[in-house]
Amino acid sequence: MGSLHAGEGTFGWLYTLDLQPKGTWEFEQRLQYNRGQAGGTYDFWQARTEVEYGVNENFQLAGYLNTSYTNAYRNYPATDEYPNGETGGWGVAYPGEGHYRKWRVEGVSLEGIYRLTNPVIDPVGVGLYGEVTLGTVKDEFEARLLLQSNFLDDKLVLATNLVAAVEKIKFVDGETGPESMFDVLFGATYRFANNWTAGMEARYHNDYYGYRYQTHTQRAWFVGPNVHYAEKDWWVTAAWRYQPTGGKCWAPNDGECSGRRVWDSHTKNEFIVKFGMPF
């Protein structure tokens, strides 16, 4: 059976503690596709182009360029004013029912991961993650507590990310919105054949109005499978998450729910493909 290579991203959305070795670089390209909101058409593509560097054996830095494309038409929940649904999208304040299409450079991100304990030699790997994003859609600071345990000679990996973030959302009309978020991401992958792993991952998502978690506005679940393949000099991961019913919204964002699902920047289906190559 093949073993994990340093820096491999075996999950779609979870971060693990498999960091770049000291003095090494890796190029990583992510492409995420979100599809399907309350009605009409909603397609959102986001690309994150990343370069990682291993500062030392337990500390990794990375920089991202973030771009996106939105295609939306009557995707917001129907209202008395717009019975067929209003058109809108992530970072978009677009009154009316017309078709909205836009490509843009969203901004840049700087990320750091520090590993406190290593899951390869310790019962539980623990790490600290921080990311700063500056952009046209939002400014954000995100922190994560990374937890990971490896079993069966590292073939089975269990991982959890506890995620806290504060965001200043920027709308096209010049207005801004203060938001904060708390998520729990967890999953498992198993190396079932040489160079292949597969598993499941889930997200328990919570949005709040205000920078200090003042008002709970959204709650939702996302769950789905992942698959990963690696060679010595490159790897690729694909994953899918589905939003089941059971989500809930509260004021002031209660208009962003329908059919027991949350919308805003969320969709019924989320797909991600990641490609990595050390250099």
Image (spheres, grey):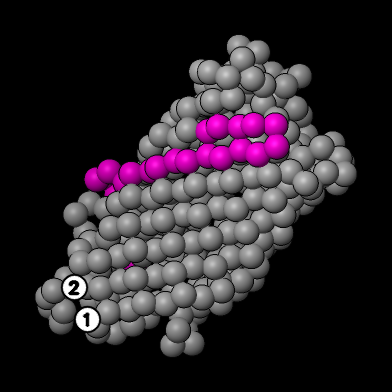
Residue 107: where, in percent of width, then height?
61, 71
Task: Give the residues drawn in magenta, as a range.
Answer: 228-253
Q: Which residue is mark 1?
A: 97
Residue 222: percent from left, percent from top: 37, 43
- Is residue 93 shown left or right of residue 31? left
Task: Using a 10 Å C-alpha cutoff, classify the residue at mark 1 as few (fewer than 14 neighbours), some (14 to 19) or many (20 or more).
Answer: some
Q: Residue furthest top?
A: 152
Residue topped by disc 2: 85
Residue at the image point whose x is 70% and y is 32% from the top: 232
Residue 82 visible at all: yes
Q: Position of residue 267 (x, y in %)?
A: 33, 56
Q: Is residue 18 visible?
A: no
What residue is rendered at 55% in x and 46% in y?
Answer: 274
Q: In the rendered view, would you say 123 is above or below 237?
A: above
Q: Quadrant of residue 45?
A: bottom left
Contact between labelled residues 2 and 1, with CB atoms less than 8 Å apart: yes
